[in-house]
């Protein structure tokens, strides 16, 4: 059964994340972060089915170049260097159909914002559900252009990265409203792909409350019942409605938990793996600093010892 999942989050320096490390992990590649000097090697990572860099630029792009430029384009310590979209790919589709669907969604983001999209499709994990096909799409936060020499440059911030205050002055809706539109776009693209493949299953980007599927209707309370409710007086109608609302809420919650549990577990494993790697990197960094400090102390002690020996040989000055 096709499951709707389309979420977005940002890569921020304030949380210790970098665009280079994030994409190296998603793509299962080895990338060097030129800003920090760290090399991120995830070539042993399993489950990466397909990767592709998508843009509207008429040049071939290098993954290391793109994400190192994204990092170098930002100066703030708390800078946002990338935006990630995660989508669940319908299990009903075959591998080629899932790939084309993911590419189509990534291209829609590129067309909408003028950015670069880096797509990584992941297969279900060996320890999870065999239906958890999903894709990670990392976007640059700045619009991509070519300079007169046909070299890549990242210039103005993409519209979705602007503050709501700035968006208001430009006559635009909030970023939250824009995210809802993109979630709707994903639902439309996925449903079209399912229909084209001959499946009746559909996904819906709306909340369960907005969908109102298989939920019991409440009774119109009217002004008298409403007035009595405000006074704290229960009526047969108000009690019935409260019961229905409680049952509906529980039904919605159960549906959501059932449908998203598998996906959330899969996505959490991705994040947990990345966090574990970050901790391991920090341990290595601290150990390296400790060794360097110890080496420096030993060298200073040796110099002092040699200096004392030299003083003894030369004897007191007359």
Image (cartoon, rainbow, N blue to C red):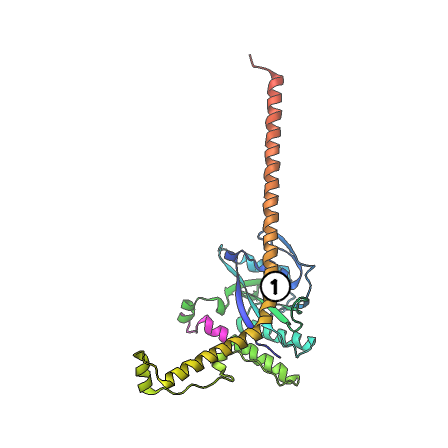
Residue 79: x %, y % from top left: 50, 58
Magenta run includes residue 131: no
Residue 127: x %, y % from top left: 67, 66
- Tell me the residue at 60%/24% (across/down): 307
Magenta run includes residue 176: yes
Which of these two is toward me, 276 or 184?
Answer: 276
Mark 1: which secondary structure?
A: helix
Q: Is residue 141 visible?
A: no
Which of these two is toward me, 274 or 105?
Answer: 274
Quadrant in the picture for the C terminus: top right
Residue 37: x %, y % from top left: 60, 51
- Tell me the residue at 31%/82% (across/down): 228
Q: Which residue is mark 1?
A: 270
Q: Is residue 291 above or below residue 39?
A: above
Q: Quadrant of residue 241?
A: bottom left
Residue 86 in the figure: left or right of residue 237 = right
Residue 112: x %, y % from top left: 53, 73
Q: Residues within 10 Å of mark 1 (few under 14, many from 20)?
A: some
Q: Quadrant of residue 33?
A: bottom right
Q: Is residue 15 above or below residue 146?
A: above
Q: Is residue 134 visible?
A: yes
Residue 197 in the figure: left or right of residue 138 = right
Residue 229 in the figure: left or right of residue 263 = left
Quadrant in the picture for the N terminus: bottom right
- Tell me the residue at 40%/87% (across/down): 219
Q: Which residues are magenta?
A: 169-180
């Amino acid at each position: 059964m096709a499951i709707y999942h389309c979420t977005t989050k940002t890569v921020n320096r304030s949380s210790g994340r970098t665009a280079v490390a994030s994409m190296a992990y998603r793509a299962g590649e080895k990338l060097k972060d030129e800003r920090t000097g760290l090399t991120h090697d995830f070539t042993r990572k399993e489950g990466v089915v397909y990767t592709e860099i998508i843009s509207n630029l008429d040049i071939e792009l290098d993954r290391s170049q793109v994400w190192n430029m994204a990092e170098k384009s930002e100066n703030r310590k708390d800078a946002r260097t990338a935006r990630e979209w995660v989508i669940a790919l319908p299990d009903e589709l075959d591998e080629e159909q899932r790939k084309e669907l993911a590419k189509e969604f990534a291209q829609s983001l590129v067309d909408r914002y003028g950015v670069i999209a880096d797509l990584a499709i992941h297969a279900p994990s060996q320890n999870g559900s065999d239906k958890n096909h999903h894709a990670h799409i990392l976007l640059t936060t700045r619009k991509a252009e070519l300079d007169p020499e046909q070299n890549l440059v990242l210039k103005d911030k993409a519209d979705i990265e602007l503050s709501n205050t700035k968006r208001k002055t430009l006559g635009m809706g909030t970023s939250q409203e824009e995210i809802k539109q993109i979630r709707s776009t994903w639902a439309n693209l996925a449903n079209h792909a399912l229909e084209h493949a001959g499946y009746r299953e559909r996904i819906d980007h709306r909340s369960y409350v907005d969908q109102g599927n298989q939920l019991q209707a409440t009774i119109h309370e009217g002004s008298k019942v409403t007035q009595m409710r405000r006074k704290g007086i229960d009526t047969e109608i108000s009690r019935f409605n409260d019961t229905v609302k409680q049952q509906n809420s529980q039904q919605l919650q159960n549906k959501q938990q059932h449908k998203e549990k598998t996906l959330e577990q899969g996505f959490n494993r991705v994040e947990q793996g990345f966090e574990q790697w970050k901790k391991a990197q920090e341990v290595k960094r601290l150990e390296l600093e400790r060794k360097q400090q110890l080496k420096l102390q030993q060298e200073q002690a040796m110099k002092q010892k040699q200096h004392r020996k030299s003083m003894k040989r030369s004897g007191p000055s007359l």
